[in-house]
Amino acid sequence: MRPETLSSRISTERLVLEPVRSDFAQSLFDYINDWEVMRWLASPPWPFALADMHQWIARSCAARDARRDADFAITLHGAPIGVIGLVGLGMGPVLGYWLARPFWGRGYMSEAAETLLAQTFADGQSFVASGVLEGNAASLRIQEKLGFRIVNERYIHARPHGRPMPHVDTVLGRGQWCEVRVSSPKSF
């Protein structure tokens, strides 16, 4: 992504993706500190403390400044309801995301991901990787609608679970992204 994109707000039809910042910590903590959200994530510790959120935001801001990652709070009417981001911008980005449970099933994550991916591919990126812990059918459906394809299955250490868990790796190339957009424009 271009450097200016890393520090910019990105608007969708209903949402604004804003670079994560410290004043979002309490709201994001309140939402991620829910086992039904956390159980589908691989990296955060469990139990999760407010200090963990502050540390993650500080690391995210440093990685954004170094142009390695681009993490955004997904905001609805100015309030954060989840996170979406790309890590590894210089090596081949990996898309990650989570959404607060009260906002599931409304198309918000599809909308946020579609907008971030459109910006990423418009900025010249060739491909984006992602994936889900096995059993996360809703997240896998989002990725499949966006054009991601399953490329591998493996075990990864899922820190909230404290053990290796089955994981499905996905990838989306710019060509596939364009095909999906042409065959089903505004599918979300």
Image (tube, grey):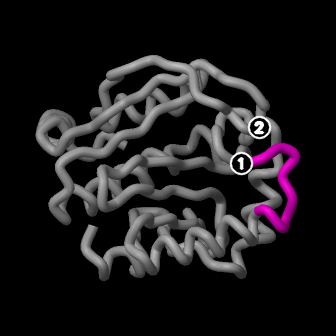
Q: Is residue 186 found inside the magenta-colored segment of the image?
A: no
Say which residue appears at 34% left-offset and 60% top-offset. 89
Q: Tell me the residue that label 2 is attached to.
A: 160
In the foreground, 166 or 140: 166
- Disc 1 to disc 2, how far (Cα)? 6 Å
Q: Please say if 136 is above or below 62.
A: above
- Residue visible at 84% across and 52% down in the picture: 48
Q: Which quadrant of the rendered structure holds the C terminus? A: top left
Residue 13, picture quadrant: bottom left
Q: Which mark is residue 8?
A: none
Q: Which residue is located at x 31 percent, y 82 percent?
A: 4
Q: Residue at x 39, y 80 (%)?
A: 8
Residue that badge 1 annotates = 44
Callout 1 secondary element: loop
**The N terminus sits in image quarter:** bottom left
Identify the amino acid type marked 1: Pro
Residue 19 in the figure: left or right of residue 90: right
Mark 1 vs mark 2: which is more N-terminal?
1
Q: Against 184, is 51 above or below? A: below
Q: Which portion, as a residue range, is magenta?
A: 45-52
- Badges 1 and 2: C-beta atoms under 8 Å apart? yes
Horizontal and vertical percent position of residue 183: 14, 34
Residues packed near mark 1 inside 10 Å, few (<14), some (14 to 19) or many (20 plus): some
48 is within the stretch colored magenta: yes
Above-or-below relation of 98 to 157: below
